[in-house]
Image: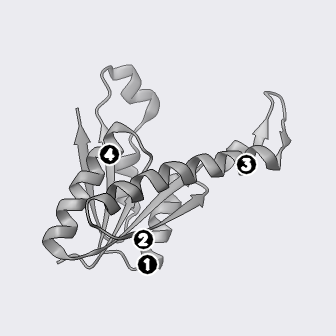
Amino acid sequence: MYKRILMAYDGSEAGQHALLECQDLMQWTGAALTLVAVMPHHIDFIGAEGGFYDPQITEREKENYKRILDQGLQVLSKAGFAANGEVLVGETISEITNYAAKIEADLIVVGHKHLDSWAARWWRGSSSSALIEQAHCSVLVAITK
């Protein structure tokens, strides 16, 4: 069964639903859980034309991601589960799969909310399917409607 689970957590409704599923998995398997929040790299730049680098914005955004991650860890703690957490910076799918390989995760858990319109689905694409293609282990996509 699963020994190490990595969950990508963003604080969204879909992420909270996935967090509940992780609690069930931890209870059934006794697996260790690590939460990660992935901050995009492009957040460093401001301006439509070429932009400029502002390290203060990066630090503020990293603190926001850390706050979201800490909220997820608190939910787990209140439910009686221990977990580790880390904020990663970079391209979401690569960061998740690389970190999962680093900790030798058996399972990656992500939340997903169905988009209502075909245009929204087309424009956004599917991070979940990209993750499944790149992951070295199983992926659980917790669906929120």
Q: Residue at x 49, y 48 (%)?
A: 68
Task: Report the Cα–Cα distance between label 3 and label 4.
Answer: 25 Å
Task: Report the Cα–Cα distance between label 4 and label 2.
Answer: 20 Å
Please state which amino acid type lies under the numbered disc 2: Ala
Disc number for residue 39: none
Looking at the image, tell me whether mark 4 or mark 2 is earlier in sequence order: 4
Task: Answer yes or no: is residue 8 visible.
Answer: no
Looking at the image, tell me whether mark 2 or mark 3 is earlier in sequence order: 3
List the residue tagged with mark 3: 58
**Labelled pair 2, 1 in contact (Cβ < 8 Å):** yes
Disc number for residue 16: 4
Please state which amino acid type lies under the numbered disc 4: Gln
**Callout 1: 10 Å neighbours few (<14), some, many (20+)?**
few
Q: Residue at x 51, y 60 (%)?
A: 94
Task: Report the Cα–Cα distance between label 1 and label 4.
Answer: 23 Å
Q: Residue lying at the far left in this picture: please name it.
A: 28
Residue 116: give x, y in percent of width and height: 30, 22
**Callout 2: 10 Å neighbours few (<14), some, many (20+)?**
many
List the residue tagged with mark 2: 100
Q: Name the one closer to the observer, 139 or 18.
A: 18
Q: Residue lying at the far front in this picture: please name it.
A: 78
Asked which secondary structure carries label 3, the reply is helix
List the residue tagged with mark 1: 103
Horizontal side of residue 89 vs 145, given as left or right: right
Q: Name the one closer to the observer, 53 or 35.
A: 35
Q: Name the one closer to the observer, 50 or 39.
A: 39
Task: Report the Cα–Cα distance between label 2 and label 1.
Answer: 5 Å
Asked which secondary structure carries label 4, the reply is helix
Marks 1, 4: nearer the viewer: 4
**Labelled pair 3, 1 in contact (Cβ < 8 Å):** no
Residue 109: give x, y in percent of width and height: 31, 58
